[in-house]
Amino acid sequence: MADSDAKQIAKFIEPLRVKPGSDVDLTRDFDPAYKAGLVTKEKSEEVLQRGVAILSAYQDRLAAQDTTGLLVCLQALDAAGKDGAIRHVMSGVNPQGVHVSSFKVPSAEELSHDFLWRYARRLPARGEIGIFNRSHYEEVLVVRVHPELLERQRLPAAAKGTSVWERRFREINDWERYLTDNGITVLKLFLNLSKEEQRLRFLRRLDLAAHNWKFSVNDVQERRYWDRYQHAFSEMLSHTSTDHAPWYVVPADRKWFARICVSHILAHTLMQIDPHYPTVTPEQKRVEEQARSELLGSAAPEG
Ligand code: ATP
Ligand code: MG
């Protein structure tokens, strides 16, 4: 990887990173239609391929070492393109080293545990990339927008009340600090879709037979809470973008641009981890030489 590529990528993704400690107002601070001067999807194909190629090379190195794992959390409103981003960006990587976990409405068993329990069970091992399609951040998003969901969590009285979100932010930050201290890098991506683009995508799902299966009445109902979600997202970004586990806000109105951003942010993170193939020790070298002589000496008789 040329140094200039690494610098270019770092510069490209810098405007998307949420500065730790900043007071984010999503609508004011981030434009869902931003495209960094790239003009069209066709011209951008090469850029996407660059990100995917770097990702593929670095994932191979990540899988070969056994110290660091990478957790990628994807959050978004419905129709923002989470699934498509995962599919495209991961197209070049070895599926054995990647696990995708999707988090839906919690089960009775999950609700009978502490709120981070179900996410902790899906963490990547060292050498792996774990993708959370929705994540522990649902606990300060959908659960905040619909307070009745918090009621179902059977919390002790002292853990409820107005300070619950501040406390959850702290607990999430502490948990992510613990993970990064122990070798699991945490990366968080928020796909930022505009209200108008979401409306158009829902209509397309209704109009096009091939897209109809993706339509859910529930999604349109959730859209009525748009402003409350924007507030919850702003709060989440303000309180949980840290130096050790930063948030990136990915402009999602153009799917092709969102995919370029996701692949480059991942590539940048892997370059920072900088995984290396294990080096062969003199003892291993000796054993390998022995194996070679044995194999050479046991060739099958001719015929
Ligand atoms: P897609 O619709 O593309 O298949 P999705 O991620 O939207 O993917 P759905 O099954 O439609 O999957 O929705 C999952 C639902 O689960 C979302 O509405 C989400 O808000 C909800 N959910 C996730 N985590 C929690 C949680 N901790 N508490 C309550 N609801 C949650
Ligand atoms: Mg859905």
Image (spheres, grey):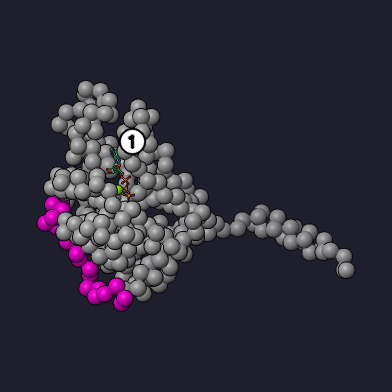
Residue 86 screen position, x and y as percent:
37, 57
Q: Is residue 91 left or right of residue 20?
A: right
- For the record, the magenta segment spans 23-43
Nearest to the observer: residue 21 or residue 54? 54
Residue 296 vertical placement versus 241 (above, below): below
Q: Picture quarter containing residue 255?
A: bottom left
Under mark 1, the amino acid is Pro
Q: Is mark 1 within 8 Å of ligand 1?
A: yes
Q: Image point 24% across, 47% down: which residue? A: 217
Q: Image point 35% across, 27% down: which residue? A: 112
Please state, as top left, top right, bottom left or bottom right, where the C terminus lies in the image.
bottom right
Q: Is residue 250 visible?
A: no
Secondary-structure class at tag 1: loop
Residue 150 screen position, x and y as percent:
23, 32
Residue on which the image places disc 1? 106
Residue 290 screen position, x and y as percent:
75, 58
Residue 221 screen position, x and y as percent:
19, 45
